[in-house]
Amino acid sequence: MTDAPGWENILNDSETILWQGRPDPAFTITGGQIAQALFGVAFAGFALFWMLMASRGPSGFWMFGLIHFSVGIAITLHALAWPTYRRRHTWYTLTNERAFVATALPFKGKSLNSYPILPDTPLRLADGQPGSVWFAQEHRRTKNGSRRVDIGFERLHDARDVLKMMTEIQRDQDARA
């Protein structure tokens, strides 16, 4: 077992830390984020238009549009800022047996998820600078069913090196079996 502070009672006796890192904290924007932000802008824009038209009527009826306007702004800000904020509060650890993803987010608190690296674990490199290494998937519920979400170490400057370590872990486990 490793003598790394903070990992007591988390790692198995045979487990050692091989690598630790963090995602690139730079602000980036994807096509999905743009689409979500545009929806938020349209939602807020319609609410603003409705408030302007309603302000011509009696008393403060227009104020009912404030909640919709606020929701549209929130959707836009969430789409643009949340992924970067989440990455800035994420840490990665790779051991000779598992990959760990730790986060410390407001309202959700701290979480530590582990994913075993087995000989049949599908590893995928999203090459680039920075790149990502994907090693798991989960299905998350949506109001219309579910969607698949890739899990891995995202936006790493040393993604190829991390992938190489992970394939070596798989080879070592395959040789032991």
Image: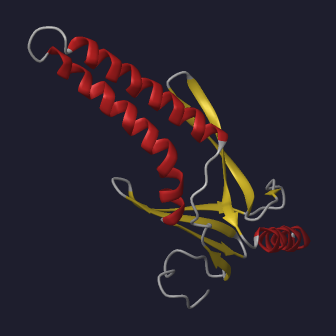
Q: Position of residue 67 (x, y in %)?
A: 26, 27
Q: What's the residue at 56%, 91% (across, down)?
A: 3
**Where is residue 2, by image quadrant?**
bottom right
Q: Is residue 144 above or below residue 127?
A: above
User: Is 21 displayed left or right of 70 in the figure?
Assistant: right
Residue most extreme to the front = 56
Q: Is residue 119 above or below residue 7?
A: above
Q: Is 168 on the left or on the right of 158, as rendered?
A: right
The residue at the far bottom in this view is 3
Q: Position of residue 100 (x, y in %)?
A: 60, 66
- Left/right placement of residue 125 relative to residue 75 reads right
* Colouring method of the image: secondary structure
At a point 59% along the width and 29% down the height, the residue shown is 146
How many badges with numbers are in the image?
A: 0
Pick whichever, 106 or 84, lies toward us. 84
Q: Quadrant of residue 162?
A: bottom right
At 81% from the left edge and 58% from the top edge, which residue is drawn?
125
- Looking at the rendered image, the quarter that the C terminus falls into is bottom right
Quadrant for the N terminus in the image: bottom right
Residue located 62% across and 67% down the image: 24
User: Residue 108: where, in percent of width, then height?
Assistant: 38, 54
Task: Report the front residue among 98 and 55.
Answer: 55
Q: Is residue 83 or residue 121 the one in the foreground?
A: 83
Kindly give the residue lying farthest to the left in the view shown.
Answer: 59
* Relative depth, front residue between 32 and 164: 32
In-image side of 82 versus 74 (left or right): right
